[in-house]
Amino acid sequence: MPATSRRPGARAAARLALPLAVVAALALAGCTAAEPGAAPSTPKPGGTLVYATGDAEPDCLDPHVGGNYPQALLAGQVLESLVSLDDDRQVIPWLAESWTTSDDGLSWDFTLRDDVEFTDGTAFDAAAVKANIEHLQDPATQSSTGYLAVGKIASVEVVDDTTARFHLTAPDSALLESLAQPWTAMESPAGIARGMDENCQAPIGSGPFVVDAWVPQDHVSLVRNDGYHGGPADRGRDGAAYLEAIEWRFLPDAASRYAALQAGQVDVIDNAQPDALRQAREGADGLVEIDAPRPGASNRIELNSGQAPFDDERVREAFIRAVQLDDGIESLFFGTAERSHSVLSSVEPLAYADASLFEPDLDAANALLDEAGWSAKDADGIRTKDGARLVLRFPVSTNQSIPAEQSLFEQIQATAKEAGFEVQLEPLDLSSWYGALFTHEYELVSAPYTKIGPDVLRILYHSDSIVPAPSGYFANLAQLSNPELDALLTEAASASDPAERAADYEAAQRIILEGYYALPLYDQQNHYLHRDAVQGARALPTVSTPWFADAWLAD
Amino acid sequence: MSDLELRAGASPADAPRSARTREDRPRRRRMPRPSVVLAAAFVGFLLLAVVWPGLLQTAPPDAISPAEAFQPPSASHWFGTDESGRDVYSRVVAGTAPSLLIGVLATAIGLALGLLLGGIAALGGRVLDFVIGRVNEVLFAFPGILLALLVIVLWGPGPVTATVAVGLSTAPGYARIIRGQLLAIRGSGYVEAARVLGHGRARILAAHILPNALVPIAALATLGIGQAVVWASSLSFLGLGAQPPAAEWGAMLSAGRTYLGTAWWLTVFPGLMIVATTLATTVLGRALTARDGARR
Amino acid sequence: MRARRIRAIALRLGGALFVLWAVATLTFFAIHLVPGDPAQAILGGPGSQAPQETLDRVRAEYGLDQPLVVQYAAMLGRLLTGDLGTSYSLKAPVAELIGGQLLGTLTLALAALALAWVLAIGLALWSSAPGRVARGVAGAIELTAAALPHFWLATVLIAVFATGLGWLPPVANGSASGLVLPVVTLAVPLAGFLAQLMREHLLDALERPFTVSALARGETASGIRLRHALRHAALPAVQLSGWAIGYLISGAVVVETIFARPGLGRTLLRATELRDVPLVTGVVLVVALVYVLMTVLTDLVATLADPRIRTAAA
């Protein structure tokens, strides 16, 4: 008797076997295609890569001016920094070959590469470094991010052509991390001398690509720098880029951007949405993901401790215990975002996390609120105290929070209500949102902040950051004012001993987390999707911007 | 036999609107057309959704349940569920009142302003016509979205601002059409005839011009409600109108558009509601204007 | 007679200049009513941490430290010389920025207008034709078309023709194929609207005495529809062309965003968000200019198409 008729399961197994074999073959094919060094993977020079960004179009391509993430994305292709980071987030050489610091930490000597030229023919030397730092510090440059990053540099001394000596006003343990950021990258002094208008149109660097033309609202054309050599120390090869050119397109609408990628009209997109990522992870359309969370702070909700009701730690803890996030994050982000329990990004080696502080516990929340005097409830089930309702105003920037995040806030609103909080979500455009912050009309707020290293804590939680800049902006949105924390953050910023620095930052993070000043959500999401024909593209470990010097097109 | 002769002998439903209403309607009363019945039923559904949404809803429209997110349409969730597990059908029902309110109020604002400007321009003499013409042209020269953007920049985004913005931006259009209609009627034969017969200005206005202008204006208004809903949803798309989590159709549609690849039902059903509402109000409005013509 | 015509033309031009002046004035004061500091807007928005001295420098550079009336006068003075000022956000001459964007939007709007007219005439003729089915179907198409929101239509068109069938690119690519979906998106709702308007007038016209006399002269019914009635029905639609251009430029804000086309619509949206006063004023003025030119043109066409207006004007 044939086996098949005797055992019905066998036929089913046979039916399954074929698709499985196909899947396996496809998976194998996928592997070989991605494997470096395999036959189809010999880099093929030439071609134009089309990159579509969902970030805002910069007003100025020079990242010294202002200094935001969209500028960093593009500047990364054109400019180079003094130092970079490797995958373990250790500082590695780039334009600077090596560096030493004096015992008091007030003077740093950078030894520069002597074989680098900017693409306008100007030599890269110590005088160029001096010109760049001075450009960042000049108020006329209108720098914000870079200005803060080089804030402790008093002057740059040109010791000789390849030695630049930085004199600091105070020791700065974050100096190298600050210099690794694209906002402090090196530009041709002759380019800077052309004046802001021209430099904004096409900053001149020493990077793998050169700005050829900028068609506003459409694209920036970048062409290959044929004389390029070097690169960050972890690059693994030398010489010019494979790609002949990059077309850098501005495609603000997420659905259109994904459609263009699916249609093969563009090769790489940034700000990929969660459902598109899931489809890519399931192998749809031959798309490949680069998951590169941004460094610095995680995405978190700050609790404004500067005024009632959150000036009472019990109310802050009650809120954090009341909300449920994990299921919402899982379903809204399709499993592409991992819950965070730290105010620092998970890529930061000094990030300290404590999940136990964020365990939902409705009973504990209710008990805490009763204890804090919010014991009465009105008809809507909202708690009251002395006639005041327990209202939490939550201005949401629709420019900065993606739809999935806004939906998550709605779920926070729903779960917090069970404990008797009324969360008032206010979706606002950027200027109204800043307006609400400046006038302190908020109890909850979520604001991303990208910076390399744990020094971001000083910007976000030192009491100095409660004092507003002339624009009204202040970064300490939790309005955390704690002398012990201030001391720890100041000490860590000038600590020369890594162990001492790490201990300080851990202690500082414990104060922030255990005081319930912030509710961490997840890392700042930063996902790129590219067609599988794009090979060799990667995100730099510095601020997770993509780098195409070693990318090539397999078709 | 030519087309026109054919038409004159054909059933009333096939005849041109005015021919039917003037000649055939009084003689042969017939059942309303199926499209009118359908439209009336749909508008009835909408009104019920405005007055008593709870009767039509199958689930609380704001009940969040992450475990049930992104379920396709089924027997328990007719229009599926959204990213937070809320029942889309119940949210569409809940969104009827805010969505229709924007449409109706915006049209009222636009039409009132349009009637005022258009009426004065056409009937108020040359100087007023010139002045209104310039005012109207200035208003006109701000394309709809720009006027809306200016209003929104001044008052901040939101449903109220969107309503006023849509109303204002449609007003010059109404004014121009109304003025054109009134002028054409004023210059037409029967008004000339009335003038020759020695009828006074007021009488001509009341007896000839206004009744004749009423039909096209009513048609405009019915079209306008749907158009206003469409406009408001465009503002929502640009992030300037109603914002999620409001269950306004335009806001639902733009929020759902993010998930087009995963959950088509989030985009399709609110979109269909907008289209269906516009269709129904227009079909009903036409039927009403036709009856109005017959009564005269 | 000639003197009267010259006076009429002068009046028309004066009216046009008045519109441009009023638009510039209204925009200027509307934008300045908005709370917020233009110097901050210049320095990258309220999130920037620009120091006070930088703010002061910028205020002086752009004349923002002057009283509002002085700023207004300065703006009018510059406008007279054709200078639209310098964009706050892009730091480039506004005239230059707009010049670069105008062609894209005008191409889009005019192509959409042309397509809308073709579609509308076809639909109006079809829906006014005898035959219950044809009229019902055409009427339903008109109504549905007019009810479609631009961004929904664009989404559906992309899903079907770009992602689904792969016939057309989902975003602009600089060639004619990239223009197809945006133009269709803009034209279809407008066509539905225009067709309804034309049909109303077409049916009216078919009852007028000239139709009967034409029939008596032995002309065929379809000939009458094409030659006489259509001309009659097109008149209100022609008069709406100025409005239609405004409608299309409005729609361009949405369409240019979705299809990633450079153009005035996107410039305007961005400039408004950034409170870039010179750029907003510039775009509004240019759109107003386009509108004024269009109305002068349509008045002319309307006069030629309708003898009643010609006699009334004479």
Image: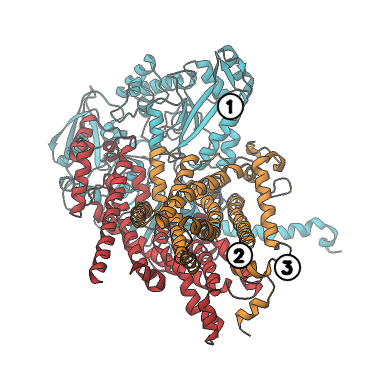
Chain colours: A cyan, B orange, C red
Residue A416 tag number: 1
Which label sits in the foreground, 1 or 2?
2
Q: Are marks 3 and 1 on the same chain?
A: no
The answer, for residue C62, to whether it is visible in the render is no
Q: Which residue in the structure is indicated by mark 3?
A: B28
In the depicted view, which residue is nearer to us: B127 or B160?
B127
Which one is in front in this view, the residue at disc 3 or the one at disc 1? 3
B49 lies above or below C265: above
Residue B176 x %, y %: 42, 58
Residue marked by disc 2? C140
Q: Quadrant of the C terminus of chain A?
A: bottom left
Distance of mark 3 from mark 2, alpha carbons? 25 Å
Label 3 SS: loop
Location of residue C125 (image quadrant)? bottom right
Task: Name the side, left or right, on which A366 lies relative to A433.
Answer: right
- Which residue is found at the position 51% from the left and 51% from the top? B228
State whether residue A201 is above or below residue A319: below
Helix, strand or loop for disc 1 = helix
The crowd level at tag 3 (other Cα within 10 Å; few <14, some 14-19, many 20+) is few
- Which quadrant does the N terminus of chain A fall into? bottom right
Where disc 2 sits, the SS reads helix
Mark whose residue sits in front, 3 or 2: 3
Location of residue A429 by image quarter: top left
Kind of residue at badge 1: Ala
Chain letter for mark 1: A
